[in-house]
Image (cartoon, helix red, strand yellow):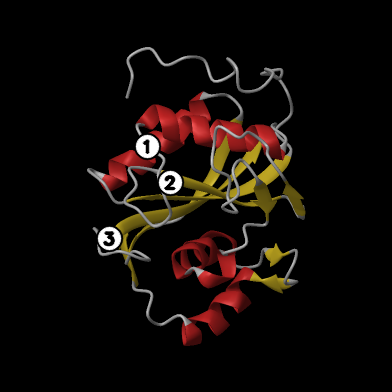
Amino acid sequence: MPKNPQPLTTGYFVALSMTGFMKNKIFLSLGSNIGNRKENIISALSFLESSGFVKINKISSFYETSPVGPKQMNFYNIVVEALTILPPGDLLRLVKRTEEILGRKFSHRWTARLIDIDILFYNNKIQTTANVDSRFRGNDRRGGALTIPHKEISNRLFVLIPMAEIATDFVHPVLNKKIGRILEKKLLTLGNQKVRIISK
């Protein structure tokens, strides 16, 4: 991590009042499969909170999960519930800036990652915003585009299991189903995805 990283607000978003009221509930998925995987995730959480724009409320257990795509080291994954004063586009910029400062190298899909942070939900919002920031890859594979809720939530046990641990009754605004119910059904069809708890 750089000794003197540039302020998060520089060139990325207009600084909001640090005394602003944290009113937007968000869920983030964090994963790593390079180096000290647990420490990478903890560093990302610390960086997000130290920005002053995000307040972490709940953190799931750590889970070790098998990778999707090419053979590589297993991932460590968690899901967190947090509050933010940032609108969705600026939250994406903060997330991608965090990944960048922690050392992530952006490449093609399904590669090993030092840190990977996805925005899963933002309140009960349903939106797709094209080209939030072309410098960063968004969460729907199109440049800096952002889709909320994340399109792959119901296809990823490494998201559903930790999220069900901390927010089983949260209702997916598109599917109109609780996360716990979605998980129950997907356990029958996504059995090839290996997920095991490693620590609370």
Percent across and percent down for residue 60 are 45, 55
Q: Which mark is residue 74?
A: 3
Quadrant of the rendered structure where residue 173 is? bottom right
Report which residue position mark 1 lands on. 104
Q: Marks 3 and 2: in contact by CB < 8 Å? A: no
Local SS, label 2: strand
Percent across and percent down for residue 11 are 60, 17
Quadrant where the C terminus lies?
bottom left
Q: Is residue 190 left or right of residue 127?
A: left
Quadrant where the N terminus lies?
top left
Q: Marks 1 and 2: in contact by CB < 8 Å? A: yes
Graded by Cα atoms within 10 Å as few (under 14), some (14 to 19) or many (20 or more), the crowding at tag 2 reads: many
The reply to whether residue 122 is visible in this rendering is yes
Local SS, label 1: loop
Q: Name the residue type under label 1.
A: Arg
Q: Which mark is residue 190?
A: none
Choose the circle earlier in sequence order: 2 or 3: 3
Report which residue position mark 2 lands on. 116
Graded by Cα atoms within 10 Å as few (under 14), some (14 to 19) or many (20 or more), the crowding at tag 1 reads: some
Q: Name the residue type under label 3.
A: Asn
Q: Is residue 178 left or right of residue 155?
A: right
- In space, the residues marked 3 and 1 are separated at their CA atoms by 17 Å
- In space, the residues marked 2 and 1 are separated at their CA atoms by 8 Å
Local SS, label 3: loop
Choose the circle earlier in sequence order: 2 or 1: 1
Nearer to us: label 3 or label 1: 1
Above or below, comparing residue 31 to residue 1 in the picture: below
Q: Name the residue type under label 2.
A: Asp
The reply to whether residue 200 is visible in this rendering is no
Q: Residue at x 67, y 71 (%)?
A: 178
Above or below, comparing residue 34 to residue 95 in the picture: below
